[in-house]
Amino acid sequence: MLTIENLHASVADKPILKGISLSLNPGEVHAIMGPNGSGKSTLSYVLGGRPGYEVTEGSVTLDERDLLGMGADERAAAGLFLGFQYPVEIPGVSNVQFLRTALNAQRRARGEPEMSAGDFLRLAREQADALGISMEMMKRNVNVGFSGGEKKRNEMVQMGIIDPRLAVLDETDSGLDIDALRVVAEGINRIMRKPDKAVLLITHYQRLLDLVVPDFVHVLAEGRIVRSGGPELAHQLEREGYSEIAA
Ligand code: ADP
Ligand code: MG
């Protein structure tokens, strides 16, 4: 479904990703772990097509289509969803407005009919309820004045509404207390644990991976994948630290 081959990328002419190869099949959850500064967020930005992140070598395909040649909106229409380590605030645009516009833009791009206001509100209410977000919060400006945990839960509401095929989630667990972590993990499992979907779960800690158990764990260090294994690798990292494993 997603194939990354020998991906090299630079930021401000500084090489950050130095040859990443990774393949995700439908139905799989892959975790990417690694110390601060290893390039985890850079990988998610490159997949999302963020300006300023320059691919210097390698390829990425989503369902055999060249992902790197697509604009950010085309990537979204192709089924890619990105969850950010630091979700953006969008003053002046309400959550529901934002999501309905995003969803309908993607449906149009796929040649599907737009969703009516009524159907959309039903869907938004259902997804918000499942993640403990009130409709009053859904009507507020996107992420403005939301706590860290609320932003992360809101991101899962967005994911539930967009219903992507591939989610790249960057440190969705950061800033969450244990109850919020459980809610977010349940959201990921409910929305994305399906035979035709895949998840790239970027995380610093193993605690999220006890709740969203990955099929594969990869360790990123200095822009390269230095180890790959099963869920037990996350526990080994927690015990032994990155320096042992990445050495
Ligand atoms: P991680 O998410 O694993 O902590 P990042 O991908 O955020 O790592 O960062 C990887 C490296 O890229 C770091 O050394 C960081 O300083 C550098 N970097 C990231 N963004 C920029 C930028 N906009 N300008 C310069 N260097 C950057
Ligand atoms: Mg990061």
Image (cartoon, grey):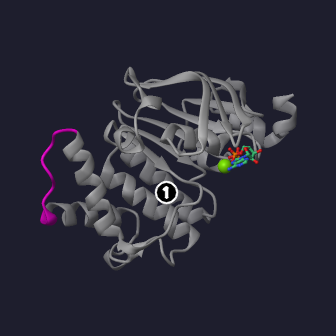
Residue at 22%, 38% (x, y): give it.
Answer: 110
Q: Quadrant of the N terminus?
A: top left
Q: Is residue 178 magenta?
A: no
Is residue 52 found left or right of 81 in the rendered image? right
Residue 102 placement (x, y as % from top left): 30, 55
Q: Residue furthest front?
A: 13
Is residue 89 found left or right of 99 in the rendered image? right
Which of the pair 70/167 is nearer the observer? 70
> What is the count of numbered marks?
1
The residue tagged 1 is 184
Q: Is residue 113 magenta?
A: yes
Q: Ligand 2: does it lie within 8 Å of the C-beta at label 1? A: no
Please state the extent of the stretch shown in magenta in the rendering.
110-118
Residue 91 placement (x, y as % from top left): 44, 75
Residue 227 placement: quadrant: top right
Which of the pair 5/122 is nearer the observer? 5
Residue 210 placement: quadrant: top right
